[in-house]
């Protein structure tokens, strides 16, 4: 006979190995989901949820009489939780212990134990009811806000989760050991967590560091002092971390002159008697010397008080440090944020915990609103029937009196032509006669009008997500106002807990990005200055057919915004970019930011003051595309770092982002195209728009072969600034800004360089002063650094002078300016110049170099 086909009670052979695997997996999942781990939505394990639901069903609200604990335990066991009575009572006791729960959920009367390790009285002696806060976890449970499921024997229904209004999991934490996994979540301050939830609702892209400005650190019911924040930050970011908690103490001097150490707070879950005994053992074993006597004087009225008497010659601070080292007066707790999410265990960071709660609240609000809408519509439907009946009162009375039975009367009402249906007809027949008076009619009319207003409001609420989240925020603020309190646990930052920036030397670095996406940073001092027209030095070792495409100078402590050709922006600190020498190729940029393979960086902005709220509110990011589109957005919209990046501009098909600049809103914008034209217009001509906008026309692009190659934002009050333009074959010049007439945006502009076969097309434009340095990089990796004042100042329509020797097949890839440095150029740094006939008109010793032959300035602005 085949296995599994015997239905007559005979034994079926099975593979014991497979059976053990299957059985153990089933057992594991039962323990994980059904007993040991909390649900991320209401923060409760099944036993706690069943206890609170049973108490609610028994009517044990905070303002009702207490009932015996044994009565509640029996209710839970008999209806919902078929396990031992001890486990249920222990779980209920813990919810009533103010030293175990940051916010107790059960109000206990009688002996519920203490911090010294004494257990509670038997359940037949103690009494319980719900705390007032607990009603916020059970409110609206009768409005179809959560799913119900059958109990263990299908005789009762129980909620799968409670529709809590408080973020219970973060507020009270949880701990438990399952099969192959465990959870250990710290309690937090209710007000701080609610502030974090509201901050998340207001900004879904908020960072964990920003959330930690609200949810600062765990807040324990027994107070104490958190010692160091690094482990807590790790827990917030990754769901796993460490908390070091110290008890609180003071050093007092007795009248005899001897000192005492008075311990007034002990770490979370530390037994005071056990701590006292431990100190005594350490003294007896001579591990700690200088202690005469230790006594636990704690009581319910005064709270924690452990007195440590010291010898006359003992140094109190030394003893204190020994107590922290050898006893539980300093205790470490592992953070392990594991909870059940959609039926599966998951490790969550701070943002994910808040997100799961907020989304659950949103679901509850939607379900509650649908329920209230349905009930309101049903009631309004009946009231409308009443009003119809009152409008035809005499006819209705006559019709009912002439009907032989209630069923006949109901049919007659339905068929009377007044538009009544079966539900309304039945309600009319059940209407008491006293409600037919004129005063009662007004009440019915008023109730109907109020219901119609409510129905309109509920329909609007269902159709408007913003209104729903505003309602969630309002309900959270009400909870905070009622139950919020001050933080109990203090936070002490360690002396060696410095910012990462403090460990990094602050200096200017050159950041380069190659065409194939390799990025590195190099000290700016590694690039020696050279005279105009020099050969340059090898500045980057690139892969075959790769070349330096972006070259940027920034401080190691600054935040950099990376704008990509598809219009997204990413954040990095300068020091987060790998360091390399001039010849190293760097690291793939995808390893540093979540940049898709088909996207690449087009512009970088150094933002030194991105944490300054006043600064970001008064500065803008100006973006331009290759097809001449320009856009301005508040810097504030880019001040919150997101690992995945955000959209900075909507790019239309066939276009791509070219440049990004930061301004104070009062600059003059100049844009230049490949064919040698440039336009100048006031920044005010571009109104600020949101990150998702497309932008407006900045300059007219002639044809498909032409494109924007540069944009600058000029300070209109700075007359020392000139416009530097550089061509593909290394020619360049400086021109005063005033030579470019001011126009409206969107025009063709005027000539900015005489483009010839000798110069090649225009490749870049910068605003510079004579006090700055210029760095030019070729596709081959050759880089040259020179003084800006070595570049001659010429008219708009000239072709300029040679700035760098470009080999055949090579071309300029990137130009950038550097601040002036106290560095003298050694004569050996200047490479000898070739006697190339094309360069005979260039003089390296003049700060005002001129060219002969074909460089006569054009006279017309329209060229």
Image: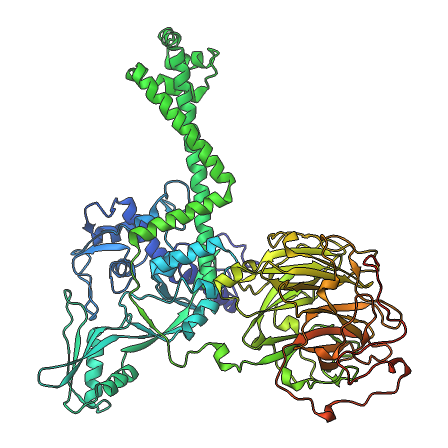
Please name whichever residue, 194 or 139, is drawn nearer the observer in this view of the structure: 194
Q: Count how many numbered circles sit on residues in the image.
A: 0
Tell me: residue 396, above or below residue 343.
above
Q: Can I make out residue 791 in this image? A: yes
Tell me: residue 600, above or below residue 822.
above
Please name whichever residue, 140 or 321, is drawn nearer the observer in this view of the structure: 321
Instruction: Please report the residue visible at 25 percent of the width from the left and 73 percent of the height from the top.
Output: 266
Instruction: Please report the residue visible at 78 percent of the width from the left and 89 percent of the height from the top.
Output: 831
Residue 612 is left or right of residue 721, and the answer is: left
Residue 829 is left or right of residue 60, and the answer is: right
Residue 236 is left or right of residue 286, and the answer is: right
Residue 53, position as x, y percentages in the image = 32, 49
Split into 4 quadrants, where in the image is the C terminus?
Answer: bottom right
Tell me: residue 675, above or below residue 320.
above
The quadrant in which residue 586 appears is bottom right
The quadrant in which residue 555 appears is bottom right
Instruction: Please report the residue visible at 54 percent of the width from the left and 57 percent of the height from the top.
Output: 4
Split into 4 quadrants, where in the image is the N terminus?
Answer: bottom right
Residue 606, position as x, y percentages in the image = 60, 70
Q: Can I make out residue 550 in this image? A: no
């Amino acid at each position: 006979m085949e296995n599994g086909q015997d239905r007559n009670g005979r034994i079926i052979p099975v593979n014991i190995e497979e059976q053990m695997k299957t059985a153990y997996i089933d057992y594991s999942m039962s323990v994980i989901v059904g007993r040991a781990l909390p649900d991320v939505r209401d923060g409760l394990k099944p036993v706690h949820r069943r206890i609170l639901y049973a108490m609610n069903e028994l009517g044990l609200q905070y303002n009702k009489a207490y009932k015996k604990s044994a009565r509640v335990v029996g209710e839970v066991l008999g209806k919902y939780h078929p396990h031992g009575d001890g486990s249920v009572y222990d779980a209920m006791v813990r919810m009533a212990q103010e030293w175990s729960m940051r916010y107790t959920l059960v109000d206990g009367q009688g002996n519920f134990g203490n911090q010294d390790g004494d257990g509670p009285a038997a359940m037949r002696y103690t009494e319980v009811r719900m705390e007032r806060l607990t009603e916020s976890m059970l409110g609206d449970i009768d409005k179809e806000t959560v799913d119900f499921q059958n109990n263990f024997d299908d005789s009762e229904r129980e909620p799968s989760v409670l529709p809590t209004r408080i973020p219970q999991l973060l507020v009270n934490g949880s701990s438990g050991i399952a099969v192959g996994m465990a959870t250990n979540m710290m309690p937090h301050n209710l007000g701080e967590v609610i502030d974090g939830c509201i901050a998340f609702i207001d900004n879904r892209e908020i960072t964990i560091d920003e959330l930690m400005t609200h949810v600062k650190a765990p807040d324990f019911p027994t107070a104490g002092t958190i010692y160091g924040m690094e482990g807590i930050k790790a827990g917030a970011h990754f769901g796993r971390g460490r908390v070091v908690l110290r008890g609180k103490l003071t050093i007092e001097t007795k009248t005899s002159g001897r000192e005492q150490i008075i311990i007034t707070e002990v770490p979370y879950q530390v037994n005071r008697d056990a701590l006292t005994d431990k100190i005594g053992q350490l003294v007896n074993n001579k591990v700690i010397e200088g202690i005469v006597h230790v006594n636990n004087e704690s009581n319910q009225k005064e709270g924690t008080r452990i007195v440590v008497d010291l010898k006359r010659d003992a140094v109190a601070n030394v003893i204190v440090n020994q107590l922290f080292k050898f006893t539980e007066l300093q205790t470490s707790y592992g953070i392990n944020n594991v909870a059940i999410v959609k039926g599966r265990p998951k490790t969550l960071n701070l943002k994910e915990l808040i997100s799961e709660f907020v989304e659950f609240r949103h679901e509850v609000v939607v379900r509650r609103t649908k329920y209230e809408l349905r009930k309101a519509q049903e009631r309004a439907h009946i009231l409308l029937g009443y009003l119809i009946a009152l409008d035809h009162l005499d006819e209705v009375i006559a019709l009912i009196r002439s009907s032989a039975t209630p069923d006949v009367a109901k049919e007659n009402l339905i068929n009377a032509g007044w538009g009544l249906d079966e539900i309304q007809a039945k309600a009319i027949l059940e209407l008491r006669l006293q409600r037919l008076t004129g005063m009662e009619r007004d009440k019915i009319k008023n109730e109907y009008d109020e219901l119609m207003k409510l129905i309109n409001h509920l329909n609007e609420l269902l159709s408007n997500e913003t209104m729903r989240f505003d309602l969630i925020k309002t309900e959270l603020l009400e909870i905070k106002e009622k139950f919020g309190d001050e933080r109990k646990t203090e936070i002490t930052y360690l002396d060696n807990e410095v910012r990462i920036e403090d460990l990094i030397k602050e200096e200017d670095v050159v950041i380069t990005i190659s065409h194939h996406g390799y990025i590195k940073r190099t000290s700016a001092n590694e690039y020696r200055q050279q005279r105009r027209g020099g050969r340059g030095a090898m500045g980057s070792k690139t892969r075959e057919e790769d070349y330096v495409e972006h070259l940027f100078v920034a401080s190691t402590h600054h935040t950099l915004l990376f704008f990509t050709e598809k219009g997204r922006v990413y954040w990095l600190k300068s020091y987060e970019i790998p360091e390399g020498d001039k010849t190293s190729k760097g690291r793939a940029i995808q390893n540093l930011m979540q940049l898709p393979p088909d996207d690449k960086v087009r512009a970088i902005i150094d933002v030194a003051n991105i944490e300054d709220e006043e600064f970001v509110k008064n500065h803008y990011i100006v973006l331009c595309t290759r097809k001449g589109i320009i856009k301005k957005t508040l810097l504030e919209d880019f001040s919150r770092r997101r690992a995945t990046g955000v959209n900075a501009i909507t790019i239309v098909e066939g276009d791509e982002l070219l440049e990004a600049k930061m301004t104070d809103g009062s600059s003059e914008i100049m844009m230049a195209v490949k064919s040698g034209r440039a336009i100048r217009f006031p920044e005010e001509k571009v109104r600020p728009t949101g990150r998702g906008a497309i932008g407006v026309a900045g300059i007219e692009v002639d044809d498909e072969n032409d494109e924007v190659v540069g944009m600058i934002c000029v300070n209109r009050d700075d007359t020392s600034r000139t416009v530097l333009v550089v061509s593909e074959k290394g020619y360049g010049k400086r021109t005063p800004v005033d030579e470019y007439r001011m126009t409206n945006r969107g025009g063709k502009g005027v000539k900015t360089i005489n483009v010839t076969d000798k110069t090649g097309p225009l490749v870049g434009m910068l605003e510079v002063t004579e006090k700055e340095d210029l760095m030019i990089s070729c596709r081959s990796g050759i880089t040259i650094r020179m003084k800006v004042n070595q570049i001659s100042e010429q008219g708009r329509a000239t072709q300029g002078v040679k700035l760098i020797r470009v080999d055949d097949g090579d071309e300029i890839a990137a130009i950038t300016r550097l601040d002036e440095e106290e560095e003298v150029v050694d004569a050996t740094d200047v490479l000898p110049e070739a006697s190339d006939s094309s360069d005979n008109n260039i003089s390296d010793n003049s700060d005002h170099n001129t060219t002969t032959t074909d460089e006569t300035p054009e006279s017309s602005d329209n060229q």
